[in-house]
Amino acid sequence: MSSRTDRANAIRALSMDAVQRANSGHPGAPMGLADVAEILWREVLKHNPRDPGWWDRDRVVLSNGHGSMLLYSVLHLTGYDVSIDDIKAFRQLHSKTAGHPEFGECPGVETTTGPLGQGMANAVGMALAEKRLAAEFNRPGHEIVNHRTWVIAGDGCLMEGISHEAASLAGTLELGKLVCLYDDNGVSIDGAVDAWFTEDVPGRFRSYGWRVVEAVDGHDPGAIERALAAAVDSDGRPTLVCIRTVIGFGAPNKQGTAVVHGAALGEDEVNAARLTLNWGYEPFEIPSQVYESWSRVAEGEQAQADWQVAFESYGADHPELAAEFGRRMQGRLPEGWADAIRALAASAQAEMKPLATRQSSQACLDVLGPRLPELFGGSADLTGSNNTRWADADDARYLSFGVREFGMTAVCNGMLLHGGFRPFSGTFLVFMEYARNALRLSALMGIPNIYVYTHDSVALGEDGPTHQPIEQLTNLRTTPNLSTWRPCDTAESAVAWEHAIARTGGPTALVFTRQKTVPQPRDAATLESVRRGGYIVSREGNGLDAVLIASGSEVDLAMRAQKRLAEKGASVRVVSMPSTDVFLAQSRAWRDSVIPPDLRARVAVEAGHPDYWRRFVGLDGGVLGIDRFGLSAPGAEGMAELGMTVENLVAVVEETLGR
């Protein structure tokens, strides 16, 4: 049986060897945290390397994702499907072992990390999901949901503002099964952090309502064991364990300095570290006895088997709950869930009632909420403005996140990654900018979170340019794997919500108005065409002179311009395009039937930045948009002042036609 030192040094050796081979990476944190990881993964965690997706496993998030070789090393050593060849391929093309951990690419990686602090917020979301599921499904004598969420974070994570948002929320929500292991090594890329990071971290977390275990020697196994045991012995508060480590521990000439943070040690220092650590093996060579003492396969399989027996007993006593829990954790939607939202679209089409599309969105939630128990919503202190709380939503399924747009978005990412919930979150469209990087990571991970963004243009009015979005729609539409919808009325809003719920391969942004919109007439076939993202909402008269393309509230503007142009003898088609990405995913035949490729007279109109629409109208077409910041005025007056009028739209079309 190998010693703890040997097992920890196996992490150090694999980490420095992989980084050296790649000539790229961050060996310092893995080498410094090796003693902590050895105890955490071998003695504390509940996990099964043969089934990384086991529902009741402990979740571990490496928030300081640059230290990815720490995670890859322990996954390899404990028996996950991460081979020594995968370790050798660190940071190489199509490798499981990417530069920063990527969800879905490597078994055992719970979330994509790298942008510092977000992993911590993801972990808060995972712990929140565990707590809410336990409250919903556990019954006396049956604790089928009972696991912890562990997050490893460094100084950089705690400097990032999102860590303040997430940690504050975690304390308020009393997430007692959340543990943060703070790697307090005192060094970041620029050097010793005491020149720019001197706050009282333990005091800060105590003020959030966390329990704090201080001054743990990260190279003393006994001290680490005692600290992790204290963390497990929860008193209902989340726990911060402050662990003092030496970055690059074992590299005799570089440990404790910034040079080991983000660069290969160099061959000479790697060889010197081998001597210092008494590790007399070749690069990537791990002795069999070390592998044997590291493996957690048998223990993990037994733990899961024991849980499965308990779950079967639960199912015998509570069959409906067991079936529902299984459905939720598998991510399967309930049968017939979409019937009500489709009925809403049809009834809205028949009613033709003017509504702000944020109100249309709430009408959608009113029918979806009771039919989707996994739906979990929230808003960043704008519930009444975002219209995100459905009629019978209780506090178990709705959360006021406070003014924490970035934290809220990353927490919702964590909830979805945990399983059992389909989260959505709300804020004003312009404040998407605060949450931008978490939204981007959800698209990168391909997870189907839903983002509700209201107050979608200068038409929101008196709050003025600080609150009026201009470039944000282009930002959303150019984000890979993000589906963006800007519906024009209730019928389109219902289709947008159905699309967002049904989507499995990425997130969806739903963009809604503050002001009332005019419902558009559609027959049954036209209503069905909304699902294609872009469709003919109003056909031309005799012949076809031009095509007008619009989204959201500007569809009505296009309809009024069409009528004015008809009076002038021009035959114009109006295309509503609530989702450009969905439209572009249609067949060429459909796209060409909506926007004929040989028609040069094309005009797009939207109360936002015009440049994105050039891909649809070409250089010969026209765009009526807004390429300056807004102004403080009632919405209709502001729109007119910034040129969003029928007269201006007619003029752009006529110019395109050469009249």
Image: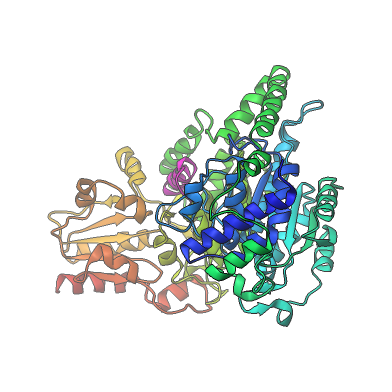
Where is residue 161? Give x, y as percent: 66, 69
Between 40 and 591, the residue placed more toward the observer is 40
Q: Residue at x 22, y 67 (%)?
A: 618
The colour scheme is rainbow
Q: Where on the picture, by quarter, is residue 210? A: bottom right
Where is residue 459? Give x, y as percent: 48, 68
Where is residue 634? Give x, y as percent: 52, 73
Where is residue 469? Give x, y as percent: 49, 70
Q: Residue at x 52, y 44 (%)?
A: 82
Q: Where on the picture, by quarter, is residue 606? A: bottom left
State which quarter of the image contains the C terminus: bottom left
Q: Is 486 included in the stretch rendered in magenta?
A: no
Boundaries of the magenta span: 491-509
Q: Residue at x 53, y 40 (%)?
A: 81
Q: Is residue 74 in view?
A: yes
Give the answer, above or below, for where 349 lies relative to 640.
above
Between 595 and 260, the residue placed more toward the observer is 260
